[in-house]
Amino acid sequence: MSSEPCDPRGRRRPPAARAAALARPAALVLALLGAAWGASAHEGASPQQLRSFIDHQVGGLQKLTVPARDADLPQPRLADGRPDPFFETTEAKRYLGKLMFHDPVRTARIRPEFGGAPATAQTASCGSCHFGEAASKAGTLLNFAVGGEGRGYTDEQGRFIPRRRPRADLLPALRSTPLFEGDALVDSLPTLTDVYQTPGGVVTGSPALGRKLTPPFQLTATGRLDGLDSVARNAPGVIGFAFNNRLLLGGFAGEPDASPGGLNPFGHPAQENVALLLLDAHRMLEAQSSVLQPIAVYRQLFREAFPAEAAQAPNCVPQRQPAAGDCDALINDVTVFRATASFMRTVVTRNTPWDRFLAGHNGALTEKQRRGAKLFFTRAEEGGAGCYTCHSGPMLNKQVNDPDVAGVGHFVERNFYNLGLADHPLQALNRAGRNDPSFRDDGRREITGRDSDAFKFRVLTLRQLKDARLFFHNGAFTSVRDVVKYFNAGVAQDAQAGAAATFSSRFAFPRGHGTPRGLGLSEAQVDELTDFIENGLYDPGFLTHDPHSPTPTFQLNERDVVYSKYRPDLAALGAQDGRPPSGKAPDNDDPLSRRDMGLEFLDVTAQAYVSVRSDPRPGHGRQNDVARITNNSTSVIDTHLLVIVQGLPRGTRLANASGTTSGGEPYLRVFLPQGELAPGRSIVAPLSLDRALPHDRPLRYTLRLLSGQGQP
């Protein structure tokens, strides 16, 4: 029986007609499939389709996957593949490095001859400019370590607001006119600027200059030792340090010592090199050993982390105080930066929605985030954003075609770009200190000496940006969406950087030569891409301790410092729960930071004038008062204001109390606008007082005012 198609009357169609008829169902099927794919693509594709697409784009999803174990994170290895023992990541080294990272005891190198203030010694740490609430960055435009005070406060919605400011109460004013917005007048040079006197005149540059100049020369000024430790770039995050062959925004760390701007005397990888550079930059080098060695807990931890070195220091034991020289082979600058590097190598996030999506969890990303991911991994020439071409690998910080994209990386210079950005505000100090009003931060060129590297800065990880607050080396952008819009426009922020020969065409014309500037994304697509980067790449375990999360907190957590539970041997040696081994406050040990952390409170009653307006209605059980509190002093009242009600009659309670002091008195927590009450400014505090029985006479009581967070 013939299977050839017939017309409705049963007549056989001619061949051309038969071919057309056969094509119609196939065309209909293809059209339906195309419509289905189009709808699916509009929704970000199904999870399975999207994974398959990304797998194709990057050459395998394994290139995007974060190793589950710290020991499998990138680290230097011997020719046979085993970890190099000198650099090997061990849990003992990681733990020691983390404790030291957050311990202010080490910032002991204070030199008054360069402007250092002895009262600021041991008040800051690496954690002053790198903390979990800000994605391991500083969270503020101006970043201060030694010579600064404060950490941050929570607002009424429970949001953490980073806040650190210069110690204007301790540091002398150096000029009368501000050089930049927020200039407290007490800082002379950015941290990484040195000034040398040579026979040929004054020479200014980075600390690498001291290894490049021909003697005789003399260091006459340095930002490493002046009154305020400040950074003239936005402090970079620590996340993903293991996955870099150059670190810091210009690639200073990991650069060979022979480079014009290299400072790598041991020829170490970027992680050890950056740890050494930070010890020097932040007042620890050559001074920290003498303050670490007397601490029994540290002697124990160093013995655990460095058994070979411990064997060379048999008298450096936790049970007794060492004599001079007993601990030098074990606790020294080299073992310190090795432990610090081990900790920083392990700073990763593993439990973002993106990580769970890669592992096969179809519902990990929302539909909107999947659409954003599709844009992220679609080339700009094909209608996407093309982010993955520069942001690939587990930390999304490398070129997609890097042969070692899942490791430290093979490419170097291809990871630095000129995106047309202006300088950080603190570069005004460099212009003044160098007596050069035209000075510019030229990024990578400072390190390599090549004009072809002018204004280029390092490609960074995109993980945890939801908390990063400030973006790019100049900190000029304050939201992920603003950054996406900047790339979408493709227009330089700064005329000089944008006019340089190094200005990136991949940024300006990502869709190819002869196309309009930028990516050309719609507002909806900008939102989708922003949602993927901001929320799809965010891991709450990095900030909040979760014993079930594969991501440890960046800050010291319960397992780190509740010694009585997890390390009773260290508790027996004097370790105090909640604090690093020195016993100082974590991160910062200045009075404002201790108030910010709820470790102590400042009585500001004498600083304020309080007037109370009472409810005039007699015979009621509740008395509604309003206290107007005016800062009557010349100093700021900061953090939270705790209004403690004292002297209430028995049976009377503060109905709107925030809590009760350790002495049993009710208090009201007042959240100050921008975390402070400036001199001459006022704030009101409503007080609702309930009596046991109605009474005609108004209640009498006194108010005590404390500055601080936590429970008094």
Image: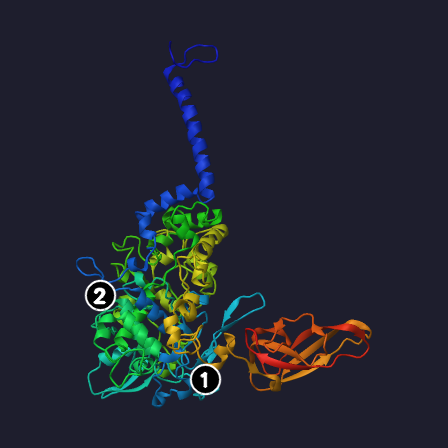
Q: Quadrant of residue 299?
A: bottom left
Residue 34 horizontal/vertical position (percent): 43, 35
Image position, residue 128 (x, y; %)? 42, 74
Judged by depth in the image, the label closer to the viewer, 2 or 1, is: 2
Badge 1: residue crowd in 10 Å (few <14, some 14–19, many ≥20): some
The one of 326 and 628 positioned closer to us in this rendering: 326
- Cα separation, mark 2 vs mark 1, equals 47 Å
Residue 670: give x, y in percent of width and height: 61, 73
Three-letter amino acid code at disc 1? Leu
Give the left or right position of residue 205, taking residue 40 as reference.
Answer: left
Can residue 623 be seen here? The reply is yes
- For label 2, the residue is 85
Using residue 670 as the reference point, say whether residue 332 is left or right of it: left
Q: Hey, what amino acid is under mark 2?
A: Pro
Query: What residue lies at 37% left-to-right and 61% top-to-bottom?
Result: 348
Q: Residue furthest left?
A: 79
**Which callout, 2 or 1, points at the residue further toward the start of the chain?**
2
- Residue 345 lies, in percent from the top left, at 32, 64
Residue denoted by label 1:
185
